[in-house]
Amino acid sequence: MAASIAWWFVRITPMWAWCRVTAARGALRPRRYQTTVIPFLMFAVLCGCGKTHDVDVVPVTGKVFFGQQPAGGAVIVLHPSEVDPAIVWTHGYPHGVALDDGTFQLSAPPFGEGVPLGKYVVTITWPDRVPGADAEEDGDPEAVDRLEGRWADPAQSRLTAVVEGPETSLPQIQLR
């Protein structure tokens, strides 16, 4: 019985409260690691949960056109052309979606709004529907690329970008 009471106090009651609790067989006394080491480790873990990426990012904007018309809904992705071991792309490469006027702004989660400095190969796809729209409407589960994959492969794309300085505005991308 005393063991089940002690277990209940250890699991349910906060540490500072059960330090003073007594059971039928004697006082429950926490070990030193329970009062010093565990709170220190919890503090260290919580401090480590913040933004820890020491990568410089800059805002990147641009415009994309197909012929004379803005390519609204086009998906622009920057693929790094040089491997930087300090950057781990856990959430995909820098990307953005063009607005109706053809302008876009790129971001690279988890680095925030902006793109890490460096050289990139640009790929562009232009789905026939806006990304995130219901793909089941016409029975076609995949959107069709209006550009027919001409700029979708980073190994074959001739579009490049260099991200540098406090802000980078890419030259207007003219697709044909």
Image (cartoon, rainbow, N blue to C red):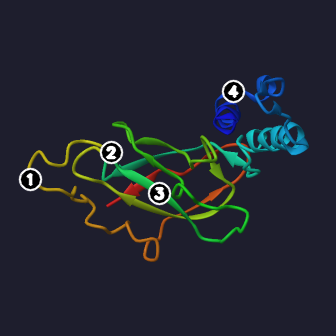
Along the line of sight, the residue nearer the viewer: 168 or 152: 152
Q: Quadrant of the N terminus?
A: top right
Q: Write down the residue under mark 1.
A: 139
Q: Which residue in the protein does label 3 denote? A: 77
Q: Is residue 56 left or right of residue 4?
A: right
Disc 2 is placed on an element classified as loop
The CA distance from mark 4 to mark 1 is 56 Å
Which residue shows up at 53% across the image and 51% down it? 171
In the image, which is nearer the foreground, mark 2 or mark 4?
4
Which residue type does callout 2 highlight?
Gly
- 32 or 159: nearer the eye? 32
Whichever of labels 4 and 1 marks the residue nearer the N terminus, that label is 4
Q: Quadrant of residue 26?
A: top right
CA–CA distance in space, label 2 to label 4: 54 Å
Residue named by callout 4: 13
Seen at 53% across and 58% down, the residue is 93
* Quarter of the figure with the C terminus: bottom left
Identify the residue shown where x is 27% and y is 43%: 130
Write down the quadrant of residue 18 in the picture: top right
**Marks 4 and 3 in Cβ contact (< 8 Å):** no
Q: Label 2 crowding class (10 Å Cα cut-off): few <14, some 14-19, many 20+?
A: many
Residue at the spot of label 2: 73
Q: Earlier in the sequence, mark 1 or mark 3?
A: 3
Compute the Cα span from label 3 to label 2: 13 Å
Q: CA distance from mark 4 to mark 3?
A: 51 Å
* Callout 4: SS: loop
| Residue 120, picture quadrant | bottom right
Going by the numbered disc 3, the residue's amino acid type is: Val
| Furthest residue in direction bottom, as rendered | 155
* Mark 3 and mark 2 residues within 8 Å of each other at the beta carbon: no
> Could you say which disc has been placed on residue 48 in the image?
none
Q: What amino acid type should be assigned to the residue bearing mark 4?
A: Thr
